[in-house]
C-alpha cells in the first residue's frame, strides 16, 4: 500500500517526497479534484495525504468521496505553518465513530 500527497506547499511536498511519498502540488479546488481523480485510478494507493488548506478548499468533494469509498483513506495533514485548531485524524475519528480524543 502506497501513500500519495496532495499539497499546496512545495516544502511539505518536498519533505514527503524525500521520505518516498509520491504526490503533486496544486492550488485550486479544480486541481485538487483532478489530482484526487487521478490517484483514485491507482489501486496501490491506500492513503491520500492532503494539506489542511486543500482539504478545506475541496471539503464537499472530498467528504463525498470519503462517504462513498472504503479506500483510500483521506488524511488531512498540517503544512509547514502548523496544524489548524482541529487535527485531521482527530476530526476523522470523531466524525467516523463519534469518539472524541
Image (spheres, rainbow, N blue to C red):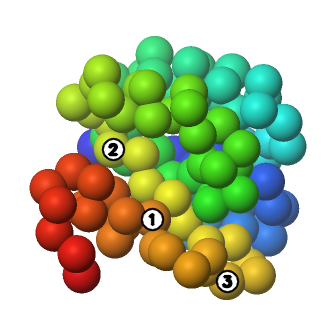
Disc sitting over residue 21 in the figure: none
The answer for how far apart the CA atoms under marks 2 and 1 are is: 12 Å
Image quadrant holding the N terminus, namely top left
**Residue drawn at 83 percent across, 62 percent down:** 10
Side (left or right) of 49 relative to 65: right
Quarter of the image where one finds residue 44: top left
Q: Residues within 10 Å of mark 1 (few under 14, many from 20)?
A: many
The earlier-in-sequence mark between 1 and 3 is: 3
| Secondary structure under the numbered disc 1 in the rendered image | helix
Q: Mark 3 points at which residue?
A: 82
The answer for how far apart the CA atoms under marks 3 and 2 are is: 21 Å
Q: Residues within 10 Å of mark 3 (few under 14, many from 20)?
A: few
In the image, residue 59 above or below residue 53: above
Question: Is 57 or 21 nearer to us in this picture?
Answer: 57
Question: Is 96 or 80 nearer to us in this picture?
Answer: 96
Question: Is 98 or 4 nearer to us in this picture?
Answer: 98
Q: Name the residue under label 1.
A: 88
The earlier-in-sequence mark between 3 and 2 is: 2
**Residue drawn at 49 percent across, 75 percent down:** 86
The earlier-in-sequence mark between 2 and 1 is: 2
Whether residue 44 is visible to the viewer of this picture, yes or no, is no
Q: Where's residue 24, x and y in %?
A: 71, 43
Q: Where's residue 36, x and y in %?
A: 57, 28
| Secondary structure under the numbered disc 2 in the rendered image | strand
| Secondary structure under the numbered disc 3 in the rendered image | loop
Q: Name the residue under label 2.
A: 73
Whether residue 79 is visible to the viewer of this picture, yes or no, is yes
Quarter of the image where one finds residue 26: top right
Amino acid at each position: 500500500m502506497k501513500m500519495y500527497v496532495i499539497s499546496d506547499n512545495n516544502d511539505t511536498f518536498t519533505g514527503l517526497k524525500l521520505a518516498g511519498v509520491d504526490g503533486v502540488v496544486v492550488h485550486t479546488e479544480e486541481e485538487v479534484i483532478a489530482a484526487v481523480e487521478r490517484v483514485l485510478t491507482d489501486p496501490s494507493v491506500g492513503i491520500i495525504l492532503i494539506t489542511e488548506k486543500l482539504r478545506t478548499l475541496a471539503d464537499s468533494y472530498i467528504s463525498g468521496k470519503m462517504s462513498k469509498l472504503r479506500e483510500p483513506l483521506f488524511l488531512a495533514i498540517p503544512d509547514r505553518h502548523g496544524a489548524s485548531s482541529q487535527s485531521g485524524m482527530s476530526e476523522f475519528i470523531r466524525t467516523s465513530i463519534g469518539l472524541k480524543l
